[in-house]
Image (cartoon, helix red, strand yellow):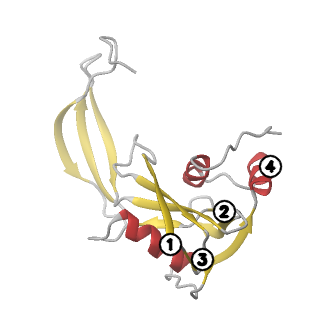
Amino acid sequence: MNNRASDPRPWELIKQKSGPSLKVFGSRYEYRLNPRNGKELECLILDSKDWVNVVALTPAREAVLVKQFRFGRAGVTIEIPGGVIDAGESHADAARRELREETGYSAENWTYLGATEPNPAILNNLCHHWLAEDVRRDHPLKLDDGEDITVITADIEEIKNALSSGRMRHALAIAGLAKVFDLRTKIE
């Protein structure tokens, strides 16, 4: 993927100002100059800490999943465990902590799967993906006040069925799972 003369160019930053204070995100407005047409555009940026998610596999190669209510969708989603990386915490430590807190599982065998940009149109953070293998449930759940989680396990066929039926749609969970499994399935 070489750069070409016709590739988009960075937009010059003209000025910034603070945006509203939000519970989970910081926010700011940036005013940038479009190099294609010379017009100034106001852009809302949500400042967020980086996130982590975990594809956790049991010795039987079933994935540990969580069901939880999500405010943005006003409904229950099926996801892989994950969350915000705390200040001063490495993404590796956050992955271990989130798996333990949300599911009660832990593992000795961990593999870093890389990072994705959750939504670079408005967010400035990364989501780090981890694989935990041969997980075992050996801790009680430790949920925060904003969580109400049910822990389930599913094999790859059950995951594919949840994807094809639309019961599983969380993009970051699917991105993490796709780094481990071939998720191609016929969408009905």
Q: Are marks 4 and 1 in contact (CB under 8 Å)?
A: no
Q: CA distance from mark 2 to mark 4?
A: 13 Å
Q: CA distance from mark 4 to mark 3?
A: 25 Å
The residue labelled by disc 4 is: 165
Three-letter code for the amino acid on which mark 4 is drawn: Ser
Lower sequence index among marks 2 and 4: 2
Three-letter code for the amino acid on which mark 2 is drawn: Thr
> Along the horizontal axis of the image, is 132 left or right of 156?
left
Q: CA distance from mark 4 to mark 1?
A: 34 Å
Q: CA distance from mark 3 to mark 2?
A: 15 Å
Q: CA distance from mark 3 to mark 1?
A: 15 Å
The residue labelled by disc 1 is: 108
Q: Are marks 3 and 2 in contact (CB under 8 Å)?
A: no
Q: Are marks 2 and 1 in contact (CB under 8 Å)?
A: no
- Badge 1: residue crowd in 10 Å (few <14, some 14–19, many ≥20): few
Lower sequence index among marks 4 and 1: 1
Q: Position of residue 67 (x, y in %)?
A: 67, 69
The residue labelled by disc 3 is: 103
The residue at the point 77 percent across, 40 percent down is: 185
* Residue ranking furthest to the right: 188
The residue labelled by disc 2 is: 77
Q: Nearer the viewer, mark 4 or mark 3?
A: 3
Q: Position of residue 54 (x, y in %)?
A: 53, 62
Could you tell me which secondary element the residue under label 4 belongs to?
A: helix
Residue 91 visible in the displayed image: yes
Could you tell me which secondary element the residue under label 2 belongs to?
A: strand
